[in-house]
Amino acid sequence: MNYWFILNAVLFMSAVMLYIRDSSVAVLMAVCGLAFILFNWNMHAIFSKIRNLDNRNERIRIAGRARKIMPFHVVSGIVGLAFIVLHILLIYLRYDVTYMKFKAVSGGVAFAVLSAVVVSGYLRRKKATGKRRLAHLYLSMLLFWIMALHIIW
Ligand code: HEM
Ligand code: HEM
């Protein structure tokens, strides 16, 4: 099984456990957003598999499947972003800004990187250059770790 897939599952389960401990609508929105974002992360597992396969027919078969997933990838990135915007709005309504200092800083950075991931995805879709491909991939990796920091700490 892909190493990133396991990390995704661990992060998602941690978020669900935190939601069970503190079941507010704000955190529920965050968990829903996270589900869409992590679903998108698994594109990397698919692409890594295509790159590592020797068998040409297998590569074509999986690349075809990846192409079919693409429309869902774009929609899911935007829906994930929308859920996170709701999470942020509800957090602001619920908390005193001084109380959530650290969470707000890590969350703010995560939100900035998430927006950059969506923009780089859009640019990559418009015209795929090597730089754009790497930008989307590396920003997604950075996003994973910043979200982990925001959620677990
Ligand atoms: C990509 C962006 C974001 C993601 C994926 C995200 C995800 C999450 C998740 C899954 C939780 C539940 C974990 C927990 O309760 O400790 C959470 C909690 C929280 N988030 Fe975010 N968040 C994001 C952005 C933000 C931003 C920008 C803020 C700042 C306003 C923020 C403020 C908070 C706060 C204060 C909590 C704790 C809520 C509580 O315990 O009741 N988040 N976030
Ligand atoms: C939550 C947001 C998103 C995340 C976490 C994400 C993550 C990823 C990852 C990890 C890959 C595989 C990269 C690789 O291994 O080379 C990928 C591919 C891609 N993403 Fe995203 N993405 C997001 C949103 C978007 C959006 C909004 C768009 C377009 C508007 C987009 C367009 C693309 C394209 C065009 C590819 C390449 C597909 C191909 O080569 O056939 N992504 N994305």
Image (cartoon, grey):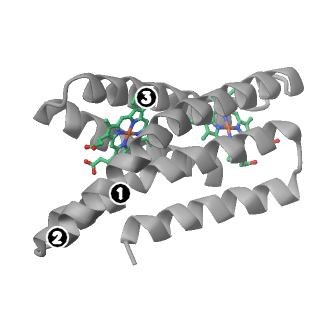
Which structural element holds mark 2?
helix
Task: Indicate the amino acid at tag 3.
Answer: Val
| Residue at the spot 70% in from the left edge and 45% down from the top edge | 32
Q: Is mark 3 within 8 Å of ligand 2?
A: yes
Which structural element holds mark 1?
helix
Locate residue 103, reporting x and y percent. Answer: 66, 37
Residue 62 at least partly seen? yes
In the image, taking residue 81 as reference, residue 119 lies left or right, namely left
Marks 1/2: CA–CA distance: 13 Å
Task: Indicate the amino acid at tag 1.
Answer: Arg
**Mark linked to residue 118:** 3
Q: Earlier in the sequence, mark 3 or mark 2?
A: 2
Q: How many marks?
A: 3
| Residue at the spot 38% in from the left edge and 71% down from the top edge | 3
Where is mark 2, residue-wise?
57
**Mark linked to residue 65:** 1
Locate residue 71, reporting x and y percent. Answer: 45, 38
Marks 3/2: CA–CA distance: 32 Å
From the viewer's side, name the closer residue of 126 and 113.
126
Quarter residue 86 falls in:
top right
Quarter residue 98 falls in:
top right
Residue 150 at least partly seen? no
